[in-house]
């Protein structure tokens, strides 16, 4: 994925960060396509390098790290990067510094730097899912440091909310672990919603605000209590149309009954799976 400087930095073809369905609009008021989570594809480990290039949309930026500090030099459009987390994520002992880079007041990339090396670059500009689906309005993003994998350094809990395309709305989140300097998701969840109004007739009466979306999916709960971490899958019981109003945790479907499925770490698959009853 990367090449070593000082030669021209290698172009980084950014892989999607998280899975989220945003695509062509089906007939009005139809049920969303059920979400089937495919096993995560673990990319080959890549050596840490001193520089990389970010190409995303109109952006063409050279990224370099010095003592964990990230510098972005762009051909035209500007990229502003700010530190959002610092943690022990990968070997050798860090700390690793997580940077969020914005352009036009929207998140565009996450970058993890360690000393003078760049470990990971992820596109969060709205290019989501294996088909390269677009979010017309880029999602908001939050990053938290967690420690949920046994006998391992810390991990990143990344949440994206508000991926908006015509008549569609979605969220996605996941826990990311570093192995041999490469990040891979070990727990994921997403919520996909479709507006139930008549998109073929701009003069049609819109649906009520409290019943404007048909949604499927859920979220993660990554929590620490009494010094112990837990991961749960949250699935709201959405037995009808809902609004786009979010609860205090920023989740859709607030006020509905929520099924909580505890997840456990499965060393064989290197992922979190449903715990045994």
Image (cartoon, rainbow, N blue to C red):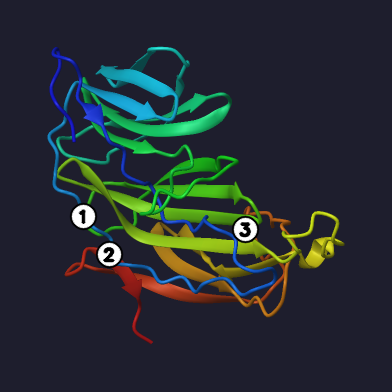
Q: Which residue is mark 1?
A: 42
Q: Which residue is mark 2?
A: 271
Tag 2 or tag 3, which sits nearer the N-term?
3
Q: Nearer the viewer, residue 54 or 182?
A: 54
Helix, strand or loop for disc 1: loop
Task: State how far apart marks 1 and 2 are (Cα).
Answer: 11 Å
**Which percent across, then down, holds residue 165?**
60, 49
Using a 10 Å C-alpha cutoff, classify the residue at mark 3 as few (fewer than 14 neighbours), some (14 to 19) or many (20 or more): some
Q: Which residue is mark 3?
A: 251
Image-quadrant location for residue 245: bottom right
Task: State how far apart marks 3 and 2 are (Cα).
Answer: 23 Å
Against 43, is 40 above or below?
below
**Which percent across, then down, holds residue 102?**
49, 26
Against 37, is 164 above or below?
above
Q: Is residue 88 left or right of residue 232?
A: left
The N terminus - image quarter? top left
- For this orientation, the residue located farthest to the bottom is 277
């Amino acid at each position: 994925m990367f090449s070593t400087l000082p030669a021209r930095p290698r172009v980084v073809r950014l892989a999607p960060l998280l899975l989220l369905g945003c695509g062509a609009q089906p007939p009005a008021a139809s049920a969303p396509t059920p979400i089937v989570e495919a096993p995560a594809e673990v990319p080959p480990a890549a050596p840490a390098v001193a520089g990389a290039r970010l190409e995303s949309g109109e952006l063409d930026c050279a990224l370099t790290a010095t003592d964990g500090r990230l510098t972005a030099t762009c051909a035209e459009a500007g990229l502003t990067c700010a530190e959002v987390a610092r943690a022990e994520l990968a070997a050798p002992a860090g700390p690793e510094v997580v940077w969020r880079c914005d352009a036009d007041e929207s998140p565009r990339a996450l970058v993890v730097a360690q000393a003078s090396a760049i470990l990971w670059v992820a596109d969060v500009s709205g290019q989501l899912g294996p088909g390269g689906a677009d979010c017309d309005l880029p999602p908001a993003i939050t990053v938290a440091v967690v420690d949920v994998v046994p006998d391992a350094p810390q991990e990143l809990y990344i949440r994206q909310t508000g991926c908006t395309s015509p008549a569609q709305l979605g969220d996605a989140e996941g826990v990311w672990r570093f192995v041999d300097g490469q990040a891979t998701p070990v727990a994921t969840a997403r919520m996909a919603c479709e507006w139930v109004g008549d998109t073929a007739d701009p003069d049609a009466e819109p649906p009520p605000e409290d019943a404007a979306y048909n949604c499927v999916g859920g979220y993660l709960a990554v929590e620490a209590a009494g010094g112990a971490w837990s991961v749960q899958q949250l699935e709201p019981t959405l037995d009808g149309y809902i609004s786009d109003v979010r609860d205090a945790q920023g989740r859709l479907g607030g006020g509905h009954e929520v099924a909580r499925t505890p997840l456990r770490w499965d060393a064989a698959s290197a992922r979190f799976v449903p715990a045994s009853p």
